[in-house]
Image (spheres, rainbow, N blue to C red):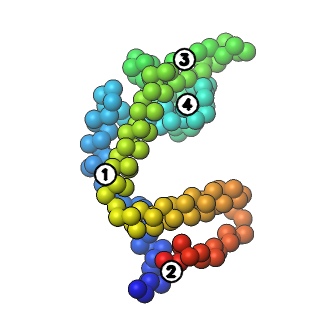
Amino acid sequence: MTLPDRTTMLRELVDELAFRNPMRKMHAMRHWPSGRLSLVHLNVLMLLDEDGPMPMRGLAEALDVSQASATGIVDRMEQRGLVVRERDDQDRRIVRVGITDEGQALIAGLAAERRDHVAEMADRLTDDELAGLLVGLRAFRRIRDEFHSQPHGTDTPLPTPTPTPETAR
């Protein structure tokens, strides 16, 4: 079997990885646990889950919205029990927004649902397809980690990997 040239393979890989179906994503958003969950609410939950409690001003900056808009977003999320406001111990004027146990459970549930969905799809692959995909994804993770460990804006190219018997297939 002759492989296409590297440029063609890279273009086809990006096409495969970037494929998305907006209508399917919108349908999923409408049917998530706890009712409708907007992308903004999901973004807030992911930020707070990753970074911990944040001052309202920092949250507004991270979301690229005004502080008034962030307050409205947090109001709605607080009513649903997903976030909580707390006064800063050092400066009582600062209000920090944190994720609640219910918000963390929602994030965990979404991650578990995604894993189950991926496992169900992967189970339909042949053994050879599964082995090839695993090798490719591990290589992709390695190069992604190398890419993100480099300072941005440098002219230092990433090393070209040496083909191994697993990747040469």
Residue labelled with disc 3: 85
Q: What amino acid does circle 2 point to?
A: Arg
Front residue of 135/71: it is 135
Per the model, the C-alpha gap separating discs 3 and 4 is 12 Å
Circles 4 and 1, Cβ within 8 Å, touching? The answer is: no
Q: What amino acid does circle 4 point to?
A: Leu
Per the model, the C-alpha gap separating discs 1 and 3 is 33 Å
Circles 2 and 1, Cβ within 8 Å, touching? The answer is: no
Q: What amino acid does circle 3 point to?
A: Arg
Nearest to N terminus: mark 2 or mark 4:
2
Nearest to N terminus: mark 3 or mark 2:
2
* Residue 14 x %, y %: 45, 67
Q: Residue at x 50, y 65 (%)?
A: 136
> How many numbered marks have been drawn onto this rendered protein structure?
4
Nearest to N terminus: mark 3 or mark 4:
4
Q: Estimate how packed mark 2 is, as few (under 14), some (14 to 19) or many (20 or more) residues with alpha carbons within 10 Å.
A: few
Circles 1 and 3, Cβ within 8 Å, touching? The answer is: no
Per the model, the C-alpha gap separating discs 4 and 1 is 26 Å
Name the quadrant containing residue 144.
Answer: bottom right
Residue labelled with disc 1: 22
Residue labelled with disc 4: 48
In the displayed structure, 7 sits above or below 15; it is below
Q: Estimate how packed mark 1 is, as few (under 14), some (14 to 19) or many (20 or more) residues with alpha carbons within 10 Å.
A: few
SS for dot 2:
helix
Most extreme residue toward the bottom is 2
* Residue 26 x %, y %: 29, 44
Front residue of 145/132: it is 132
